[in-house]
């Protein structure tokens, strides 16, 4: 079964074709700057070199036609025809309170995803566009939606209700949803295998540290709290997002700097975090380069990042009581040994001891980086959201057939 995994953003499409029986990646690609003057098509057939091409006047439909033309191209493609796509797995950012797991897409599911646009105006419209185009293009091919929020729908009210007037929850569904769910679930499943027990008996703290960052507290296999909230802005300091701040700062700034809503939005989502404090970049590698040269702002940015991560991990230790393992994943989690080491430093009293040598040796790989005495295991587990989406798609399509 060939599964096309699609991640449709507002101006980009990320995709993979996975032969799911063997979990083999056949090809992957990224279309960037859709709708701009020049659209960039990146493509790589497994085992071959990356190919990049540029085209003008590309809207969303044309971008998808381009992807299909590439995948079925006699020279560089991996499929003889479009009919060799057996199912499509769509990443959907927001499933609101409707979806607690992945689902086969029908008209009602499409309507529900549309209803969530209100609370995910930047993401759901693009996700929906991809769904609509493929349902029309391949009417007999099943489409599955895999939601970023679904894994966190198990959170109890005590963790998802904000201490605001309660009618705002009823009226606008303002509550904490959490994101990165597909990644947290995937690494949790991998961690359970390493621990040698079913996920339903595992207590875990999973740290997804990419450009966006979130931490999740998993109790007996289910998410009971996560650091992102109503939107992905809450929680940890991130590449360009502030994470937790006193909400009054927003009102204060709007008044003092006469800022409009979109200006505050850009300030908090695009100009803050590592970029905002360092004044250098949202990329942690460039921040370390400057910090090592003695740049105080860069040093401070890295210290705040680590401090806030440590605080969240500490709070989830308190919430969970017993923790089997802490997992690091995504760009920073998988590749940055300093962040891992420092965020768990001096936590022996909590049963956490990182083996510094293993932490260095295993950087960019998968494995255990805690000492044998450490009660809480610490793992690096590379995330693979596309594979998780493909697995869900396979399961749902097969269950639907039987
Ligand atoms: P996204 O959320 O966009 O998928 P990623 O998971 O790729 O982001 O993470 C991006 C972050 O990971 C950046 O801060 C980047 O510096 C960091 N990162 C990526 N590769 C490395 C690396 N080899 N060493 C250290 N940091 C890395």
Image (cartoon, grey):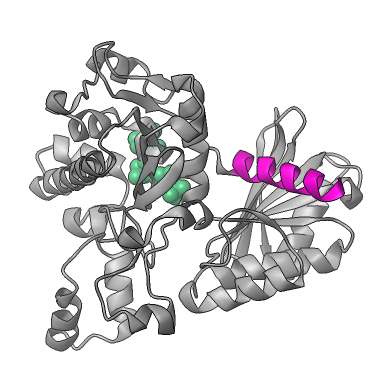
**Does residue 249 lie above or below 69 as drawn?**
below
**Does residue 276 lie above or below 82 as drawn?**
below
In the shown orientation, is residue 195 left or right of residue 349?
A: right
Image quarter where the C terminus lies is top right
In the shown orientation, is residue 275 left or right of residue 225?
A: left
* Residue nearest the observer in this picture, 175 or 251: 175
Spot occupied by residue 240 in the image (x, y as percentages of width and height): 31, 58
* Residue nearest the observer in this picture, 78 or 214: 214
Q: Which residues are magenta?
A: 386-402
Spot occupied by residue 311 in the image (x, y as percentages of width and height): 18, 45
Res. 125 visible in picture: yes
Quadrant location of residue 379?
top left
Where on the image, by quarter, is ligand 1?
Answer: top left
Image quarter where the N terminus lies is top right
Quadrant location of residue 352?
top left
Q: Main secondary structure of the magenta part?
A: helix
Residue at (8%, 46%) from the top-left corner?
A: 296
Residue at (50%, 79%) from the top-left corner?
A: 118
Res. 382 visible in picture: no
Spot occupied by residue 60 in the image (x, y as percentages of width and height): 69, 69
Instruction: Based on the picture, tell me whether residue 400 belongs to the magenta stretch.
Output: yes
In the shown orientation, is residue 331 left or right of residue 121?
A: left
């Amino acid at each position: 079964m060939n599964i096309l995994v699609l991640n449709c953003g507002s101006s980009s499409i990320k995709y993979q074709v996975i032969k799911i029986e063997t979990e083999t990646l056949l090809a992957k690609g990224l279309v960037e700057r859709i709708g701009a003057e020049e659209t960039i098509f990146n493509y790589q057939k497994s085992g071959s070199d990356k190919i990049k091409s540029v085209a003008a006047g590309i809207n969303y439909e044309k971008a998808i036609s381009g992807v299909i033309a590439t995948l079925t191209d006699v020279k560089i493609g991996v499929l003889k025809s479009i009919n060799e796509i057996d199912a499509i797995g769509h990443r959907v950012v927001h499933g609101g309170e409707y979806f607690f797991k992945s689902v086969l897409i029908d008209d009602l599911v499409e309507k529900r995803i549309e209803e969530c646009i209100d609370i995910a105006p930047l993401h759901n419209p693009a996700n929906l566009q991809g769904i609509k185009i493929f349902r029309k293009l391949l009417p007999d091919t099943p489409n599955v939606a895999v939601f970023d929020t679904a894994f966190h729908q198990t959170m109890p009210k005590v963790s998802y209700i904000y201490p605001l007037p309660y009618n705002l929850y009823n009226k606008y569904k303002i509550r904490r949803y959490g994101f990165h769910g597909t990644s947290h679930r995937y690494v949790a499943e991998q961690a359970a295998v390493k621990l040698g027990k079913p996920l339903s008996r595992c207590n875990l703290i999973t740290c997804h540290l990419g450009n966006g960052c979130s931490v999740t507290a998993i109790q007996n296999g289910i998410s009971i709290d996560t650091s992102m909230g109503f939107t992905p802005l809450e929680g940890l300091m991130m590449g360009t997002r502030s994470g937790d701040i006193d909400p009054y700062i927003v009102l204060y700034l709007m008044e003092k700097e006469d800022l409009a809503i979109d200006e505050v939005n850009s300030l908090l989502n695009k100009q803050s975090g590592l970029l905002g404090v360092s004044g250098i970049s949202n990329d942690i590698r460039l921040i370390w380069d400057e910090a090592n040269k003695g740049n105080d702002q860069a040093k401070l940015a890295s210290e705040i990042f680590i401090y806030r991560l440590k605080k969240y991990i500490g709070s989830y230790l308190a919430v969970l009581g017993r923790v089997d393992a802490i997992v690091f994943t995504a760009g920073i989690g998988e590749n940055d040994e300093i962040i891992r080491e420092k965020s768990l430093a001096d936590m022996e009293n909590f049963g956490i001891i990182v083996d510094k040598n293993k932490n260095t040796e295993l950087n960019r790989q998968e494995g255990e980086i805690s000492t044998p005495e450490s009660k809480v295991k610490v793992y690096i587990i590379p995330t693979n959201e596309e594979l998780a989406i493909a697995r869900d798609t396979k399961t749902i399509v097969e269950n639907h057939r039987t």
